[in-house]
Image (cartoon, coloured by chain):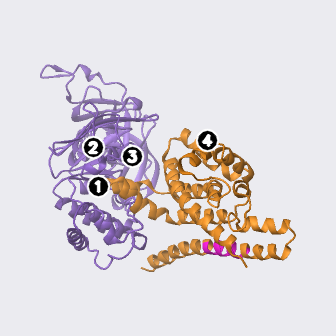
Chain colours: A purple, B orange
Amino acid sequence: MSLSVDIRKRLGSFSLDVSFEVADGREILALLGPSGCGKSLTLKCIAGVLAPDEGRIVLNGRTLFDSEARVNLPPQRRRVGYLFQQYALFPNMTVAGNIGAGAVGASREERARRVAEQVRAFRLEGLERLRPAQLSGGQQQRVALARILAGDPELILLDEPFSALDGHLRWELEMMLADVLRAFPGGAVYVSHNRDEVYRLCDTVCVVDRGRSEEKLTIAQLFSTPTTLAAALISGCKNVSRLDSWPGASCQVDNRPGANCQGGVLACRDWGVSLTTSLPVPPNVTHAGLRAHYLRVFADPANAAGLPNQIPCTVERVIDSTFSTIVMLATPGGALLRYECEKDAWAPLAGARELVVTADPSIVMPLVGGEADA
Amino acid sequence: MDWYPLINSLRIAAVATVVVFFAGVWLANLVARAPRAVKGVLDVVLTLPLVLPPTVVGYLLLILLGPRRPLGALAAELLDVRLTMVWYAAVFATVVVSFPLMYRTARGAFESFDETLADAARTLGHSERWVFWRVKMPCCAQGIVAGAVLAFARALGEYGATSMLCGYTPGSTATVATTVYQLWRTGDDAGALTWVLVNLAISAVVLLALNWFEAYGRGAGTARARRTVAR
């Protein structure tokens, strides 16, 4: 086991309660959630910059924090590399000085060797004598990573590494970061609110919703079948509806009450329709979700005949977006449904007032919302 | 012409600035990180000499350091030294009066310091001492040096508390400021004017140095920014 975190902390009215494990030594785990959900706070607790109120943090068998055993290692002894959002390079030191500052306790020769090694690895040749203020954002990030790796940490924490960069710079850096993380022998925790970055860079993901961490998922699970409302929203699901009530609490599978039902009919209050799903329905289901891209629309109801989950809609608004057309559709329940397709696919339907939307039972996602979502 | 007052003034100001520098930096760093309630109280106490009339400071110091007062008597008893009416008595006066200038400037610099730099250094494995001397102090250097220059200038110009603690003894406790007053009082207008000109010259040099230092710091910054843009 590489990293195990189970901590709680109160800060004013905000309360943090997260627990997750980075099981495999090379796993890259994403903490995904909107800003202010407690992701960065969690990283600070792992690095030892902040102390949780209670709980345990164990890294490769070493206890970093344990409120019961009264263990709280100082950040200096945790061997955790932390890539700060704004990189936190020392402005009074050169590039070489910053990287060398990562090699704590090394002899002069050893430090010079490690600096040279990192300068080569991060293609910083020629920049050694410059100061951070003279570097571009991307160069600063490379120096910060080089500084962390010069210290040979057991774990890397990354706090929104691309938020300080312009869009066009991100892509090249993202590819470099992917290489760095793949080559790094330890685990990594990657904090982000950007689902695309997480999809490309990480192996597993833990959605953090208002200070609470949800069950760890593989990246594929998060995007194909999220099971919570927070996970569905952060993974880009645009359409969710509350359910009237779920009679399936009595659903029994293998005589186990409280188990998930294999499919069922969800009465979607906001859309005014009942939709059949073929996905497992948990007993405490509260919402249904539909991805905007997976819906099908028909101008002529005859073409939709026989298809399950028909929703008669009126076109409310058509928005021409960068590479797609977004159509806002009024459902029988009054709530708007968002449908998204290629511009070419919309062309034959343009001008239609009434449409029939269908959703295959395999894309009707039963979701569990938090108490505040009910 | 007897240059003793000038030498004495520079000597007092220099010693006072060294004391104020370390005390100011230490206390500013302490207060900048203190909880809010403690901060409020300490801040008032440490800034008080800035707004008190120097004569009040002098009076309070005499209560402490006078020959028949607790500290004064103790020093006479143990070390056989006087704490008033000697040249170094002026150091006590100037330290107290110039301290707030050093303290407040340094505190401002420390408060604008980005603590994530310190956190970054800690996660890399560096000690608190390293963080302070290698990162925090260099990052705050401009504010701290500006504070020291201001404190030095104030120490040079100190009159009220100094004259109460040291009086005016030519060749012993005379400073530029007390000499100007003494010469004017005894009707030596030409002598007074000479020392006024000396004082003006020193103050101008100190303030020019301060401005140059600030402009240099800013200039270096903009030059850097320009190079970055050009890249």
Q: Amino acid at mark 4?
A: Pro
Which disc, if any, is residue B125? 1
Q: Which residues are magenta?
A: B200-209
Gap between marks 3 and 1 measured at Cα: 31 Å
Q: Amino acid at mark 1?
A: Gly
Q: Nearer the viewer, mark 4 or mark 2?
A: 4
Gap between marks 4 and 2 measured at Cα: 47 Å
Residue A265 among magenta residues: no
**Location of mark 3 (residue):** A34
Looking at this view, is A239 or A62 the one in front?
Answer: A62
Tell me the SS state at disc 1.
loop
Gap between marks 3 and 4 measured at Cα: 64 Å
Q: Residue at x 19, y 25 (%)?
A: A259
Q: Residues within 10 Å of mark 2 (few under 14, many from 20)?
A: some
Quick one: quadrant of the C terminus of chain B? bottom left
Q: Residue at x 67, y 50 (%)?
A: B49
Looking at this view, is A158 or A195 the one in front?
Answer: A158
Which disc, if any, is residue B70? 4
Tell me the SS state at disc 3.
loop
